[in-house]
Amino acid sequence: LTDNPSITVGLIEAGVYHYNDPLVYTPALGGDAIGNTSYDWAYTTVPQPGLAGRSIATARGKMLGGSSGLNLMAYTLASQAEYDAFETIASFGGGSNGGVTGWDWAGLVPYFKKSTDVDNQVDPFYGLRPNTKIRSSITSGTTGPVNVSINPWYPDIIAPVVESYNNMGIETNPDMYSGNSRGVFNSRLTIDQTEGTRAYVNYWCRAATRKNLHVLTGARVRKHLLTLSVYVLTMKPQASKILFSQGKGKGKSSLITATGVQFVVGSTTYTAKASREVILSASTVQTPQLLELSGIGNPSILQPLGIKPLVNLPGVGENLQEHLYSLLSFQLTPGHHTYDELRYNSTFQALAAAQYNAGEGGIYGTSDSTASYNPLSSFVSRANITKRIQLFDQVVQSSNPTPLQALQYVIQKSWLENGTVSQNEALMWSHELVATTGNDSFITFLSGNMHINSTSINNPPVINGNYFDNEYDVQVVKDSTQLVLDLVNTEPLKSQIAATVLPPPIANDAALEAYVRSISTPGSHIIGTAAMAPRALGGVVDSTLTVYGTSNLRVVDSSNIPLIIAAHLQGTVWAMAEKAAAIIEAAQ
């Protein structure tokens, strides 16, 4: 937005800027900050009956740059069919723009390009043609803020892994970024190879010296008043509320107007006024929290807490969706080179650190990147696919879906039937593990919720993922777990495995189910709690990302995504934010 000098932006961020902090900047340390409350909000769910009664960690980045400073830097995109589903949902029943929203694949491709600067590297991944350039994808940008690249170093176990996939009939995908994401592939990463560092605050770095940008870190919003432009300072604030003025007329004049944001620094409450509009980008967890604290949500939740409902919007905090992973671990035969050497070989670690500190990259400038996205039809028999579809139908018939869920299930069943969209991700993570998998992420019945239970921004919201609350979700994770067990028993990978660490010996189907319930964990790809969908379906924002019932409050973050996608989220969220900026600027 600050590309336009006539727009002044104020940014309120509860975290801080972890400048040059190795736990954030060094790629090989990716994920090490998860659970550390200096970097992570470290939320947990309520106990989940479907996961053996466990309360599950819900990582959220607590820093300038958000969860892009906390994750493992994978840059992946979903398939064309999945982005087209955004359009199907947003435009259902005519939508807010007469049935055309521009949120489909074709409408997002320009913004995938605009947000990225993809290195012109040759991909050395096993099974690709020589001289395959990663910049050739139709979604690859060359001038965007976010550096996207591939690793200059790889664990030596990758070639046997990929060859074994191929021997199972799962092909190498040379370009998962052009609308077909199926197969095994070398994931791009948000790493700046010139520095060997995580690329996560690049938008801010480009704009930091602009006079029309003001950034305030360490502040928590309490409430939205709604009257702002945009600014950023540095203190330690936390937004706590959005402030509004009430419309008194009919039609558009009856809408409430955001006039500002109430935020807290230490024990002092401040107000920032907004002259044009307020944009809420607080994550799938904290966006609905702030909406509810500000009087937007389900009156049955707000009124018992003494909060006056300003907009009756029951979809706030609902439609929570997430990827679930089951974990498997295998010990390799001696002689392999993986990231474990940084922990167990002090000589190797010292040499690698010296290389990295000298600006020469090496292993510290890389992160795991081998993954496969697989429709059930690529690894489950046709007869069992028929059984999965029957199970899908049974769960639908026995549930009481909301209007939004009913539409989602129609879309997801078509994907399951035609095999165009993946239901599984198998991710190789070579840090004491060869593979983690079990992604029921892409066709799932889990639909959780997140709501406040107090009027204080300091009290975390109540998160209920409803993980594994139905047999279909459990079955797909069991199928996904079996895929990896079959993979490690396929040559040439089989000969490289010395022992299975996890799971323990599985005697029967009941034991497999008990295992996945005891170990499965979310992938920190949580979406949907302020869904872009018609209000009648339970949506929270329209296709301009404006909150229903308001004239100038928008939400721009992963909570907008109406339906879980087969991808890690950061690439999609950056493109959505670029598109949102274009929508906002056009409206000024």
Image (cartoon, helix red, strand yellow):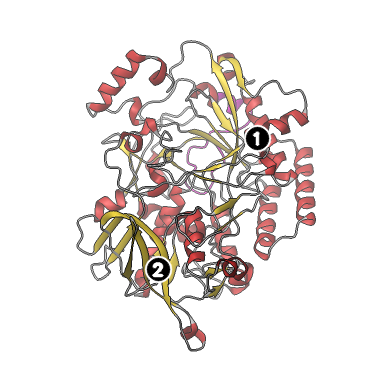
Q: Label 2 amino acid?
A: Ile
* Crowd class of label 2 (few under 14; some 14 to 19; many from 20; radius 10 Å): some
435 or 128, nearer to the observer: 435
Q: Is residue 169 magenta?
A: yes
56 or 211, nearer to the observer: 56
Q: Is residue 18 visible?
A: yes
230 or 358, nearer to the observer: 230
Q: Is residue 558 visible?
A: no
In this rendering, would 223 be left or right of 204? right
**x 38%, y 20%: residue:** 342
* Crowd class of label 1 (few under 14; some 14 to 19; many from 20; radius 10 Å): many
Residue farthest along the front direction in this orientation? 267
In terms of secondary structure, where does tag 2 sit? Answer: helix
In this rendering, would 526 be left or right of 341? right
Q: Quadrant of the C terminus?
A: bottom left
Locate residue 436: give its quadrant.
top right
Q: Which residues, given as a range, are shown in magenta?
A: 163-183
**Secondary structure that dominates the magenta span:** loop
- Residue 398 in percent (x, y) is at 79, 55
In terms of secondary structure, where does tag 1 sit? Answer: helix
- Residue 55 in percent (x, y) is at 60, 41
Q: Label 1 amino acid?
A: Ser
Q: Is residue 415 above or below residue 230?
A: above
**x 26%, y 50%: residue:** 205
Identify residue for label 2.
583
Identify residue for label 1.
480
